[in-house]
Amino acid sequence: MRSLLIFILLTSASFSVFAQEQAVIVHFYNYGSKDLTRLFALEDKLEKAITKSGVGEYDGNEIAVDGSDGFLYMYGPDADRLFLVVKPILEETPFTKGADVTKRYGPPESSTKEAHVIIAH
């Protein structure tokens, strides 16, 4: 019985990792501040929308020490569906206008297919 429980837990964990292989990575260039209040507000919106729609998870950010630019990381089983959920939020956020979005269709390997989209001004 104990072996079966361990197998089920390992199988569930493996499925969860496999299901999160695709990514949406946003590189924004126009933040221009060391005050992260606007970034945290955007993160809250993204996290709520992604969770509510069930398309994946918001993982976090990286931002330059001088506040000039940064990245947002989101993962899920379908990068296109994930992007459809976050796109309107990115389009309404002033500092993500002109951002370069990478939709990655698999694990982070050199042979993984990617698509790039620029958030409209």
Image (spheres, rainbow, N blue to C red):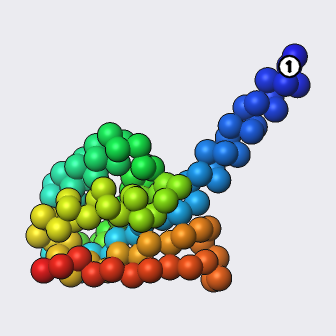
Q: Quadrant of the N terminus?
A: top right
Residue 14 lies, in percent from the top left, at: 70, 46
Name, please, the residue furthest toward the top.
1
Residue situated in front as seen by the camera: 60 or 104:
104
Residue situated in front as seen by the camera: 39 or 5:
5
Residue at coordinates 63% horizontally, 50% vertically from top-left?
Answer: 17
The answer to whether 95 appears left or right of 111 in the picture is left
The answer to whether 66 appears left or right of 72 in the picture is left
Residue at coordinates 15% horizontally, 58% vertically from top-left?
Answer: 38
Q: Is residue 17 above or below residue 89?
A: above
Q: Is residue 114 above or below residue 20?
A: below
Q: Which residue is mark 1?
A: 2
Residue situated in front as seen by the camera: 43 or 19:
19
Disc 1 residue type (three-letter): Arg
Residue 62 visible in the snapshot: no
SS at circle 1: helix
Residue 99 visible in the snapshot: yes
Residue at coordinates 42% horizontally, 49% vertically from top-left?
Answer: 55
Residue 16 lies, in percent from the top left, at: 61, 45
Rendering quarter of residue 99: bottom left
Residue at coordinates 35% horizontally, 75% vertically from top-left?
Answer: 101
Residue 6 lies, in percent from the top left, at: 80, 28
The answer to whether 94 appears left or right of 66 in the picture is left
Q: Quadrant of the C terminus?
A: bottom left
Rendering quarter of residue 7: top right
The answer to whether 27 appears left or right of 39 in the picture is right
Residue 13 lies, in percent from the top left, at: 67, 40
Density class for disc 1 (Cα within 10 Å; few <14, some 14-19, many ≥20) is: few
What number of labels is visible?
Answer: 1
